Amino acid sequence: MLRARPHLLVPAWAWRWLVPVTAGIVVAAIVAVLVPAALPAAAAGLVAGAVAAALQMADPDESRVPLADEELRRLIAEVAAELRLRRPGRVYAWARPDALALRVAPWRDELRLGLPYLTEMERDELRAVVAHELTLLALRRSPLADALYRWWMADARRGRSSPAGVESVVSGMFRSADAAGARVTGVPATASALLRGTLISNSFTWFAVRYGAMAAASHGFPPDLYAGWRWKARHDGLLTAFARSVAEDDRPGSAPTRIAALTGRAPAAVAAEIAACRGDGVGVRAEGAGSAALAAGLPEKDERRLARACMRELLGRPAARSVPLPEVPDQVWDDVLEQERAEVLAVVAALLGRRDVTSQDVVDVARAGRAGELTWDHRAWLCPHEDPAVCALFPVLHRELRESGHAYAHPLARRLLVAPDGARVDVAALAAELRNQR
């Protein structure tokens, strides 16, 4: 640790005041050396650093809003009491799709629950999430354990593997935290929370990139980002669309490996059930929010605030105005799918060794079972399609249908098109059908 990443031994909360305070000290020292008589100015530098640190600790971050729901706050307090852990001083609904407990100051812990978790998880699943996060925070109280965890998280975000020693320690933390969830709500609910949490995170990220970025194309942001995602999750099968990709993830810390460790079942059997979205404790709802903690979401002004923060973080720039998802022009979608079609034609041309490839060539490659040979990763598009063949065919077929006069059927289901005669076409289903015609 000292050789590889010594900076991680400084707690994350300390960096928030360490940088401004250090800057104030440096400024004060320079002023004192250059102008010995300017001690008041040096003192002002120290005060400025202290004020900056205080503002950092206050952290007026619009990516979260205080969670006012008394029943949820009582749930969190009960879990903390049952596990004999310190109750978080502040609880927020978070713009991100997951959950996080963290120490924002030596004297204060904070729990952030992603709004998508709050609206789509059953209460017993949410109890497991709270137990997991509070236990994980307690396990990270030592600087070394916290540093190893942050090391692993940084590598995971970049898609890299951590050293074996780091993975071993963090995997042990996850097992302990998952076991805590099982103690307060049972193994089936904890396993379901692990799976649903991953499906929620993947589907919301895909939706924010795919649909939210469309609204942002005109320098806006979708104020109905969360409501739109909820509709697709509950009524358009978006959660289960990612089951296969989740099942294929066998990295340490992934949902299948943690569910297997929690239930004592073979990883292959767990992965098979996840791919099929069935089985006790690892199934997911395709429709409805059931008894979710906040099934109706937050007040409109709060969801608008979180949507703006989410898109600013995703795009790296603030949004100038709000653009509701139904108001995104059809041409924006056509342009995106045309770009994807051009990418598919390029990789098919490379595979066939030709320049003049057509849509029919893509169909032929898919029918021949050669889509897996294409020099691209269809998962890089956060793809909800079941395999590379469907992913390759989708933009090609979509373009052909749009040029033949098909219109969009629903602003939040762009794969559905309506022919001039009124017939509805599911482009993804059509792609799967063509793939199977060998």
Image (tube, rainbow, N blue to C red):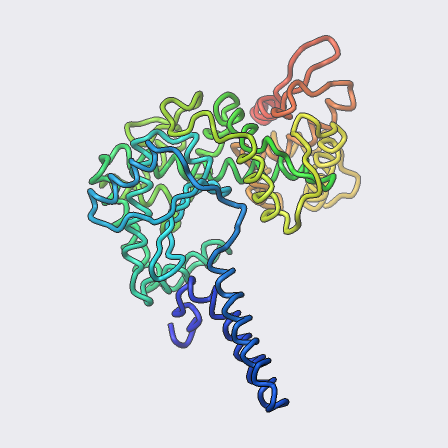
In the drawing, does residue 181 fall left or right of residue 402? left
The answer to which of 56 and 236 lies nearer the viewer is 56
The residue under the point 22% across, 38% down is 184
User: Please, is residue 351 above or below residue 327 in the view?
Assistant: below
In the drawing, does residue 385 fall left or right of residue 83? right
User: Please, is residue 272 above or below residue 252 in the view?
Assistant: above
The residue under the point 63% across, 34% down is 222
The answer to which of 375 and 258 lies nearer the viewer is 258
How many numbered marks appear? 0
User: Please, is residue 129 above or below residue 171 in the view?
Assistant: above
In the picture, the quarter occupied by the N terminus is: bottom left
Which residue is at the far top?
Answer: 421
The residue under the point 39% across, 44% down is 91
In the picture, the quarter occupied by the C terminus is: top right
The answer to which of 404 and 432 lies nearer the viewer is 404
Q: Position of residue 13 (x, y in %)?
A: 42, 62
Q: Position of residue 71 (x, y in %)?
A: 33, 31
The residue under the point 60% across, 43% down is 311
Residue 138, image quadrant: bottom left
Q: Position of residue 227 (x, y in %)?
A: 54, 28
The answer to which of 361 and 181 lies nearer the viewer is 181
Q: Position of residue 179 (x, y in %)?
A: 23, 45
